[in-house]
């Protein structure tokens, strides 16, 4: 018998709440079809003063899917979506699934090198992209990939307000070699693509996480994974069509994909999109749209507290607040409660668990680990078994610290075209999370360390290796080791230790600028320290941990 078999955390649920849920749909297309049939005139998406009803969302995505099929798109093909939080993101995802394809989400902060890696690894043949991202980044990259169709669109569409705080200087751009999304939709309006039957284990999303070594890995979130965790959010947090969902997390990240898009497609609650996160605009939006559910990384809630218009009354409509993706300081939970009167519930998971594997039950206050000061990440969600294992792979009893190994219907079957990485991270289908923690005797889980070298900058994950690779492209750099260092706002930020080649010179600012040009803004080192030598093992491996300490 396992130490976890009696699942003491079950006692934490409200009486009558099922501990097990059954996926209600085979795939996301059927899931949304049921929602659109039940309430066709309800808002599916709100984008500033723009509104898209469920019926319109169904029609727009039908037309886009028909347009894709007309251009030779086949079942299983990949569509990369490279955009901020705009309605077209959701339209493109639904269209991809309706055409039988897989949606690949790309962080809009990514630069050319990062975009190219993802396009090449996924083998995407279609790229849906904001016009300015095409002009500034993708146009150069696309010729080196399998992409044969680029569909461009603009953040100025689906709204008329165009708030200058977010859209100053943004203009429409026409390209000779791309297809305009609205034009394509107009051409196929009224056409429905043939019905596709997508099995629950068909891949819905490739969600990229950068690897410890080598190129990024595409976690294969299946339709079952997505439907299951959309239901987890709905049933755990009690969301229904009367709720209004704040879309503050980026849609390319698993949090946005599940807690925003999939949850809204399942429940029919409007998803409020805001292009990109701006604290002042977000507070106004929560107030004006009477948002009831907010989920996002803790930096979102810290920024809201510090916004010039942070007033308790503005957030009065909020009923439930959940934060995941990065550690939450208990003092921040208290401060947010003082300012806005709302308790932030912790929620934890990975891209590979299709968002949550653990969450704090609504209404419960998460305990704090007295030794590390870590706020509990909650208890495992429905049908999820989490074991804590030691270095020898043996399961540890409650209270002992080891790696969290997670199994459940939300765990991905693996990484796209990466059998070795899959076998390593998911032996026997159980995810070795790389997160180190323990379960207390009441069943609450705490994260106290990480096995992986990953840096967590406010929910944005940075793998040291990727930053080091870029530093090595600089001709003065002899050795580079990148670590996470504490940061008041982001929790952690990126620091590089560098030694230089004999006779070469470079100063920290130059190296910071060099990285900044070549990678997404959250990844480049905020600090560079130049040393004569970097600490190494006898075999010459750089000792990142020693530098961090
Ligand atoms: P991602 O794949 O970007 O979702 O990153 C997953 C990682 O984020 C996990 O392995 C954890 O290290 C970290 N993480 C996610 N949620 C939490 C949380 N609530 N508290 C602390 N760390 C978290």
Image (spheres, grey):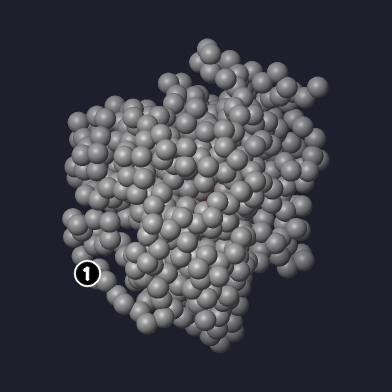
Please indicate, yes or no, whether residue 434 appears anywhere in the rendered image: no
Looking at the rendered structure, the secondary structure element under dot 1 is loop
Residue nearest the viewer, comparing 316 with 290: 290
Q: Position of residue 539 (x, y in %)?
A: 77, 66
Asked if residue 380 is positioned above or below residue 196 in the image, the reply reads above
Residue 84 lies, with reference to residue 238, above or below; the image says below
- The residue depicted at 55 percent of the width and 80 percent of the height is 144
Position of the N terminus, as image quadrant, is: top right
Which residue is found at the position 26% from the left and 62% from the top? 156
Q: Quick check: 426 left or right of 69? A: right
**Residue closest to the far bottom:** 503
Could you tell me which residue is drawn at 61 percent across and 60 percent down?
75
- Give the total of numbered labels: 1
The residue indicated by pointer 1 is 169
**Residue 544 screen position, x and y as percent:** 62, 59
Q: Residue furthest top?
A: 15
The residue closer to the viewer here, 371 or 396, is 396
Quick check: 358 left or right of 84? right
Residue visible at 52% across and 12% down in the picture: 15
């Amino acid at each position: 018998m396992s130490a976890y078999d009696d699942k003491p955390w079950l006692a934490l649920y409200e009486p009558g709440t099922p501990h097990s849920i059954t996926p209600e749909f085979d795939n996301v297309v059927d899931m949304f079809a049921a929602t659109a049939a039940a309430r066709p005139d309800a808002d599916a998406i709100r984008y500033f003063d723009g509104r898209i009803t469920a019926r319109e969302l169904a029609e727009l995505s039908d037309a886009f899917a028909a347009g894709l099929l007309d251009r030779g798109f086949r079942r299983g093909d990949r569509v990369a979506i490279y955009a901020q939080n705009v309605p077209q993101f959701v339209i493109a995802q639904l269209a991809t699934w309706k055409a039988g394809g897989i949606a690949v989400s790309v962080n809009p902060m990514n630069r050319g090198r990062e975009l190219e890696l993802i396009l090449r690894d996924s083998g995407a043949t279609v790229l849906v992209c904001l016009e300015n991202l095409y002009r500034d980044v993708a146009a150069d990259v696309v010729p080196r990939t399998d992409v044969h169709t680029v569909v461009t669109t603009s953040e100025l569409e689906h709204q008329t307000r165009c708030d200058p705080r977010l859209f100053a200087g943004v203009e429409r751009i026409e390209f000779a070699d791309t297809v305009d999304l609205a034009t394509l939709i107009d051409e196929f309006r009224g056409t429905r693509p043939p019905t596709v039957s997508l099995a629950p284990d068909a891949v819905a999303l490739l969600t990229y996480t950068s690897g410890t070594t080598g190129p990024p890995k595409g976690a294969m979130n299946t339709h079952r994974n997505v439907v299951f965790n959309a239901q987890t959010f709905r049933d755990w947090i009690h969301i229904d069509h009367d709720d209004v969902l704040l879309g503050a997390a980026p849609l390319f990240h698993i949090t946005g994909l599940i807690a925003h898009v999939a949850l809204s497609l399942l429940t029919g609650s409007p998803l409020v999109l805001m292009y990109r996160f701006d604290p002042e605009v977000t507070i106004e939006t929560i107030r004006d749209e009477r948002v009831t559910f907010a989920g996002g990384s803790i930096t979102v809630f810290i920024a809201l507290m510090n916004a010039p218009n942070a007033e308790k009354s503005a957030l009065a409509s909020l009923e439930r607040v959940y934060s995941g993706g990065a550690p939450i300081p208990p003092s921040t939970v208290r401060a947010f409660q003082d300012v806005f009167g709302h308790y932030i519930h912790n929620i934890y998971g990975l891209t590979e668990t299709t968002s949550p594997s653990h969450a704090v039950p609504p209404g419960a206050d998460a305990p704090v680990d007295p030794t590390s000061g870590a706020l509990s990440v909650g208890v495992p969600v429905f049908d999820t078994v989490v074991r804590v294992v030691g270095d020898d792979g043996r399961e540890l009893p409650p209270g002992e610290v080891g790696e969290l190994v997670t199994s459940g219907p939300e765990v991905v079957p693996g990484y796209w075209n990466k059998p070795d990485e899959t076998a390593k991270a998911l032996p026997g289908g159980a995810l070795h999370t790389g997160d180190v923690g323990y379960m207390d005797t009441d069943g609450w889980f705490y994260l106290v360390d990480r096995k992986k070298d990953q840096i967590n900058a406010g929910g944005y994950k940075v793998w040291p290796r990727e930053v080091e690779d870029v530093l090595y492209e600089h001709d003065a750099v002899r050795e580079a080791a990148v670590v996470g260092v504490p940061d008041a706002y982001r929790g952690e930020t990126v620091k590089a230790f560098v030694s230089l080649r004999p006779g070469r010179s470079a100063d920290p600012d130059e190296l910071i600028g060099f990285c900044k040009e070549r990678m997404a803004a959250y990844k480049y080192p905020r600090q560079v320290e130049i040393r004569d030598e970097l600490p190494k093992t006898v075999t010459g491996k750089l000792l990142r941990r020693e530098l961090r300490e």
